[in-house]
Image (cartoon, rainbow, N blue to C red):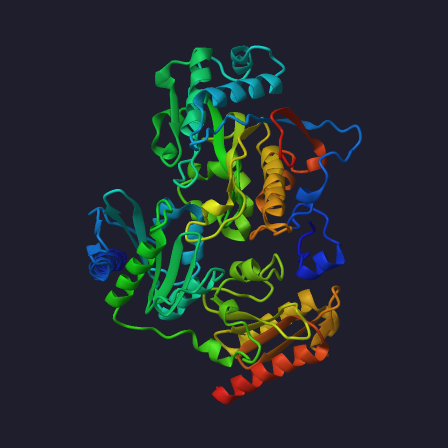
Amino acid sequence: MKKGRVITRRDFLRGTVCTAMATSSVFSSSIDEDVGAEEKVKVILIRDENAIDQQGRINQAVVQKILDRGVSTLLDEENPIQAWKKLIKPTDIVGIKSNVWFHLPTPEELEMAIQKRVLDVGVPKKNISIDDRGVLDNAIFRSSTALINARPLRTHFWSGVGGCIKNYIMFVSTPWLYHGDACSPLASIWNKPLVKGKTRLNILSLIRTQFWGRGPHYFDRRFVSDYKGLLIGKDPVALDAIGARLLQLQRIAHFGEDRPLDTTPKHIFMADEKYKLGVSDLRRIEVVKIGWMEDSLI
Amino acid sequence: MRRLLFFILVVVTAVHGEFAFAKDRSNMKTEMKKLLPAEMEGYKSDGKDQFYDRQTTFRYMDGAAELYRSYAFKLLMVRRYVKPNQPSIIVELFDMGLSEDAFGVFSFETEGEDPQVGQGSDYGGGLLRFWKGKYFVNVYAEQETSSTKQNVLEIGKGIVTSIKTEGQKPKLLNFLPRGDVVERSIRFFHHHQSLNYHYFVAHENILNLGARTNSVLAHYLSLQAKDKTFLLLIEYPNQQLATKAFQSFVKAFMPEASSSGSVRMENGKWSAARSYRKYVTVVFDAPSQEKAEELIRTARKNLEGRGS
């Protein structure tokens, strides 16, 4: 976007806005649209209908299974431990950045599944920590050499979408300073010394997704979907772009109309265009789909 | 020596200010605790009240805290009510500083039914939201059962009884054209992010909205046109700022209407804008130029009646 160019409602009416900055245009692009020979970023969408049982409990064994299969596919390895060895060394100090938002936290089953594989690689337990809001005071995170980023996908009051990029906001002591302009500078946090270059894997938990927000905490059980899946990749921007598209499709499926996000997830586009953290253009993202795909929408 | 005296003065002032602030906050906590009965409808407080201010409220509600911070929010008290074999009920009591802002944060969402609690209320999805005086309140059960709605409403009514003083709505509401206005569509806010939440105008803050501006947005329905027409009325601190914001808006949003003040938009509907003293009025999505101008004229007439 050129400096000084103001995008107004009228640009949308004219149809002259065609970037991700425009509320949902990139997210409404077809994933299958070809962009030529340019290399695509690979992300894995894996689902299992048994990830949540009849009582609403998350199945630990199934989560481990889909995590293993997803990571193996991403890294072209048969054996999940061999795949994890491509990500983590036994000498690494590993921070698993979780999310504790009490309405929809990173499932403990997912945290345990990740930790198990990091242990299997040979990292001693004392060199692994799972944390969210305490990362700045956490000795493991402060001295970490590798980070695994894992959080649920949801709509977010101030950033439009709460995904992988936003999950690192706890690595700064003044998060509110990043809330301006629809959280557009969020990706700048990924350049902080505590974080930069350390993230080996991003996992967007789609086991439950929140596709619409309401109420004091921007949470309403009516707008939570048991999607029973994971989105796995190395590029946090690509995962968030696909995640934003999924939430949009879930809103369309639920409401019968395209209800735009309350806040433009501008930070995803900015993470690509300004901060060069990854790829936000859906046409440049290859989604490898594995497992149960009923009503997958994507 | 002067520098030393100045330094001492700064330190003393800061310490005194901090002390006064802490005392003020302590008084607020005491006051808020009095407003929430220890026991209601067989539910008892779990005795673990939590308080959050403008800085710490992120720890409690993540980015959603920005909504409250966009108003004059002072302090949040969270109390959990427990009852054997019943889901806990959470009460969140916000001291919004001003009754106008308590109304403002309430007006942000009014999509549910109105259970007639306090000075304005909304119920949906197990959540009761209402305002009274300078307080805005959320009441909800951790899980919904067949009885939770009744319990939530009764607890809400109990809190309303405790809050003795009613507050006034923003005066700006008085200048809205009435007639076919949809009452539950009236929103009061300060920042442009809030405007975009309800009606997207532009990514940039082309109307120069902020903490010192008061804005009301409402929509109107006519029998002839089923679509909504929106009216935005903004009060700036002074006429100079209003004029500047008006010019900024016209330049970015309707440059071809700099002389006429109204324009047919790309969707076939009409927008119009005017600046009058310290106010700016904008109409969006009117079915005709006449309707847009009529709303602008009525708002102006109401403002003139104020004699400001």
Image spot of residue A113 (x, y percent): 45, 21
Image spot of residue A154 (x, y percent): 51, 41
Name which residue lies at 44% across and 28% down: A58
Q: In the rendered view, would you say A170 is above or below B70?
A: above
Question: Which image quarter holds the C terminus of chain A?
Answer: top right
Q: In the rendered view, would you say A263 is above or below B210?
A: above
Task: Work out whether residue B218 or residue B31 is closer to the camera in this orientation and state it.
Answer: B218
Name which residue lies at 66% across and 77% down: B292
Task: Work out whether residue A253 or residue A91 is closer to the camera in this orientation and state it.
Answer: A253
Task: Work out whether residue B57 or residue B236 is closer to the camera in this orientation and state it.
Answer: B57
Task: Answer left or right for B207 relative to B164.
Answer: right
Image spot of residue B16 (x, y percent): 21, 59
Image spot of residue B260 (x, y percent): 72, 79
Asked if one can make out residue A128 in the rendered structure from this viewpoint, the answer is: yes
Asked if one can make out residue A271 in the rendered structure from this viewpoint, the answer is: no
Task: Answer left or right for A157 relative to B150.
Answer: right
Name which residue lies at 27% across and 62% down: B159
Q: Quadrant of residue B180?
A: bottom right
Task: Answer left or right for B127 relative to B82.
Answer: right
